[in-house]
Image (cartoon, rainbow, N blue to C red):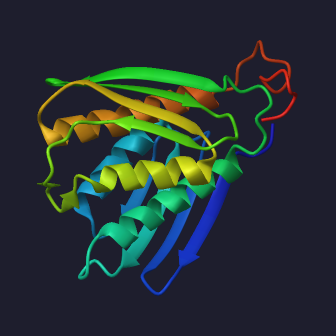
């Protein structure tokens, strides 16, 4: 199996991002971005996926945080796609049903090479800290599209926006960790097509 790391740099008129990921890490993170809630969610992602994540990002947050949030997701998805390019011997599928106080969120992941997002989080419109709740949809859509993964997120219970979003990020991290794990019983790519 190849070294499962990747570096992605994205510079536009709106954002400047540098991201490094190590899929076979220990959950170490070093994140500097001006969106505090997203920083917290990405720290949780790193810790619970056991993937090392280093991220530097800046952008036109004086206008809105949308550009930076979406571009970070593009970079994270692209990095995952690059780092997981060799899918031989992986588990491929992962799932986690994760509680966060009253919130319960189910996540299922398929590292299929085909991008798809099905997301059903019933967060009331508004903000959690400096994060617009509706940006969660944009974040996970950009991530799934650029990682080329099939991602399902479904809220089973919950009312608190912070709890719902935190459960979503943590359940995604755990499901992704499971899907990316090397399966000692798998002899090749886990697909009858022979490729993912």
Q: Is residue 162 left or right of residue 151?
A: left
Among the 4 quarters of the image, the one containing residue 97 = top left
Q: Is residue 194 left or right of residue 58?
A: right
Q: Residue at x 60, y 49 (%)?
A: 147
Q: Is residue 78 left or right of residue 72?
A: right
Image quadrant where one finds the N terminus = top right
Q: Residue at x 67, y 22 (%)?
A: 91
Relative depth, front residue between 24 and 168: 168
Q: How many marks?
A: 0
Residue 44 drawn above or below residue 125 = above
Whole-percent x, y for residue 133 in the image:
22, 52
Q: Is residue 24 left or right of residue 128?
A: right
Query: Does the image show residue 56?
Result: yes
Residue 9 drawn above or below residue 39 = below
Relative depth, front residue between 96 and 124: 124
Q: Residue at x 60, y 24 (%)?
A: 93
Whole-percent x, y for residue 139 in the image:
40, 54
Image quadrant where one finds the C terminus = top right
Query: Does the image show residue 48?
Result: no
Among the 4 quarters of the image, the one containing residue 194 = top right
Relative depth, front residue between 140 and 30: 140
Whole-percent x, y for residue 37 in the image:
24, 55
Whole-percent x, y for residue 193 in the image:
86, 27
Looking at this view, name the residue that lies furthest to the bottom.
13
Q: Residue at x 16, y 27 (%)?
A: 158
Relative depth, front residue between 137 and 107: 137
């Amino acid at each position: 199996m190849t070294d499962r790391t990747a570096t992605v740099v994205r510079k536009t008129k709106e954002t400047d991002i540098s991201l490094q990921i190590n899929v076979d890490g220990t959950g170490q993170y070093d994140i500097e971005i001006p969106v505090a809630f997203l920083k917290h969610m990405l720290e949780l992602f790193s810790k619970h996926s056991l993937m090392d994540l280093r991220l530097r990002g800046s952008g036109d947050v004086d206008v809105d945080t949308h550009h930076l949030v979406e571009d970070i997701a593009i970079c994270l998805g692209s990095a995952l796609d690059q780092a997981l390019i060799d899918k031989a011997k992986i588990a491929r599928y992962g799932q986690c049903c994760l509680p966060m106080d009253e919130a319960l969120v189910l996540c299922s992941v398929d590292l299929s090479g085909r991008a798809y997002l099905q997301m059903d989080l019933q967060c009331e419109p508004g903000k959690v800290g400096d994060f617009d709740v509706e940006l969660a949809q944009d974040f996970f859509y950009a991530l799934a599209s650029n990682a080329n993964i099939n991602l399902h997120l479904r809220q089973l219970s919950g009312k608190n926006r912070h709890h719902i979003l935190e459960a979503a990020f943590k359940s995604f991290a755990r499901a992704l960790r499971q899907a990316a794990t090397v399966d000692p019983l798998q002899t090749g790519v886990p697909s009858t097509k022979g490729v993912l």
